[in-house]
Amino acid sequence: MNMRALQRVYGFAVLICLALLLSACGKDEAAATMTAADLAGRIGNGTAPAIFDVRTPEEYSAGHVPGAINIPHDQLPDRIGEFSPYQDMEVVVYCRSGKRAGIAAEALAAAGFRNVKDLEGHMLQWQADGYPIDQISDSN
């Protein structure tokens, strides 16, 4: 091969490498998830992760995953210190359908939580699948 052909091959290889690098930039890694079936099974056998319900207190009272701790997503940044004991544990977050849990998962990750998972389908899926819920009765 002559020098000109080598330069073309080299240039083409560089372009391919750049294209591959740029295509990977900006892509979010898929968030780790746990299915409702997996979570229900782990609750049942006593190996449940920490479960954070990031809905409002009213939604939580109306029905939540057994063992879940209520921390509304909009309060999480101000109260993150309360949850530091869970920082090195597996944590599953959920809301009604996913948006608030995504915000909470980002806040937890930014605070150093390393093993945060989204509940697939969130509370809508949990209830649709017929898994048990705990309710807080109004004492009035």
Image (spheres, rainbow, N blue to C red):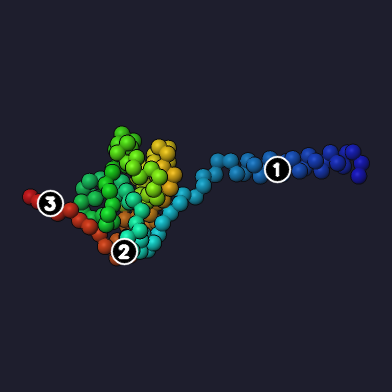
Depth order, front residue of 131/11:
131
Q: Secondary structure at mark 3?
A: loop
Q: Are marks 3 and 1 in contact (CB under 8 Å)?
A: no
The residue sitting at 9% across, 51% down in the picture is 139
Sequence-first tag of 3 and 1: 1
Q: Secondary structure at mark 2?
A: helix
Query: What residue did someone put label 2 on?
Result: 44
Sequence-first tag of 2 and 3: 2
Kindly indicate the quadrant of the structure image that contains residue 15. top right
Q: Is residue 40 visible?
A: no
Q: Are marks 2 and 3 in contact (CB under 8 Å)?
A: no
Disc number placed over residue 138 in the picture, else none = 3
Whole-angstrom CA distance, mark 2 to mark 3, is 27 Å
The residue sitting at 21% across, 54% down in the picture is 62
Q: Is residue 140 visible?
A: yes
Residue 25 percent coordinates (x, y): 58, 41
Query: What residue did someone put label 1 on?
Result: 17
Residue 124 percent coordinates (x, y): 32, 57
Depth order, front residue of 47/38:
47
Which of the two discs, 1 and 2, sits closer to the camera?
A: 2
Whole-angstrom CA distance, mark 1 to mark 2, is 49 Å
Q: Are marks 1 and 2 in contact (CB under 8 Å)?
A: no
Q: Judge the density around disc 2: few (<14), some (14-19), many (≥20) Cα neighbours within 10 Å.
A: few
Q: Amino acid at mark 1?
A: Cys
Q: Amino acid at mark 3?
A: Asp
Sequence-first tag of 1 and 2: 1
Residue 19 percent coordinates (x, y): 67, 42
Q: Secondary structure at mark 1?
A: helix
Residue farthest toward the bottom in the current orientation of the protein: 130
Which of the two discs, 2 and 3, sits closer to the camera?
A: 2
